[in-house]
Image (cartoon, rainbow, N blue to C red):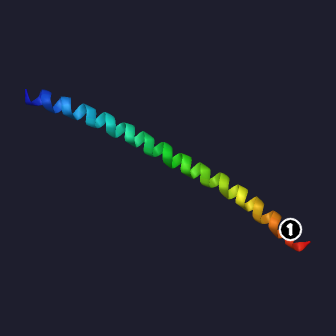
């Protein structure tokens, strides 16, 4: 009886934990990818501003 209760409580906790881990990994990947794209755009913008200053 005790093992059955533990199993019924543990399974949902593990499932929710796995979902949260997947969401966290996806969010970390998205943040890293967004930062990389913004960095490229910012580098391009800085280069164009420097070129404009030289005119």
Q: Quadrant of residue 39?
A: bottom right
Name the residue nearer the viewer: 45 or 25. 45
Image location of residue 47, percent across then percent down: 80, 64
Q: Nearer the viewer, residue 10 or 38?
A: 38
Q: Residue furthest bottom?
A: 54
Residue 10 spot, x, y in % from top left:
22, 34
| Quadrant into which the N terminus falls | top left
- SS of the residue under disc 1: helix
Left or right: 48 as drawn, with respect to 41? right
Tell me residue 24's x, y (percent): 44, 45
| Number of callouts | 1
Q: Quadrant of residue 19?
A: top left
Q: Which residue is labeled 1 in the image? A: 51
In the rendered view, would you say 49 is above or below 8?
A: below
Side of 5 where 37 appears, left or right: right
Is 42 left, or right, of 47 in this rendering?
Answer: left
Which image quadrant is residue 8 in? top left
Q: Is residue 33 above or below residue 51?
A: above
Residue 40 screen position, x and y as percent: 71, 56
Determine the residue positioned at 53% across, 46% down.
29
Q: Who's the residue at 25% across and 31% down the image?
A: 11
Quadrant placement of the C terminus = bottom right
Residue drawn at (66%, 55%) of the image:
38
The residue carrying pointer 1 sits among few (fewer than 14), some (14 to 19) or many (20 or more) residues within 10 Å by Cα, namely few
Name the residue furthest right. 55
Report the residue at 13% width, 30% height from top: 5
């Amino acid at each position: 009886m005790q093992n059955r209760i533990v199993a019924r409580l543990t399974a949902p906790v593990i499932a929710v934990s796995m979902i949260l881990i997947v969401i966290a990994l996806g969010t970390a990947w998205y943040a890293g990818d967004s930062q990389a794209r913004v960095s490229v755009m910012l580098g391009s913008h800085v280069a164009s501003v420097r070129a404009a200053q030289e005119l």
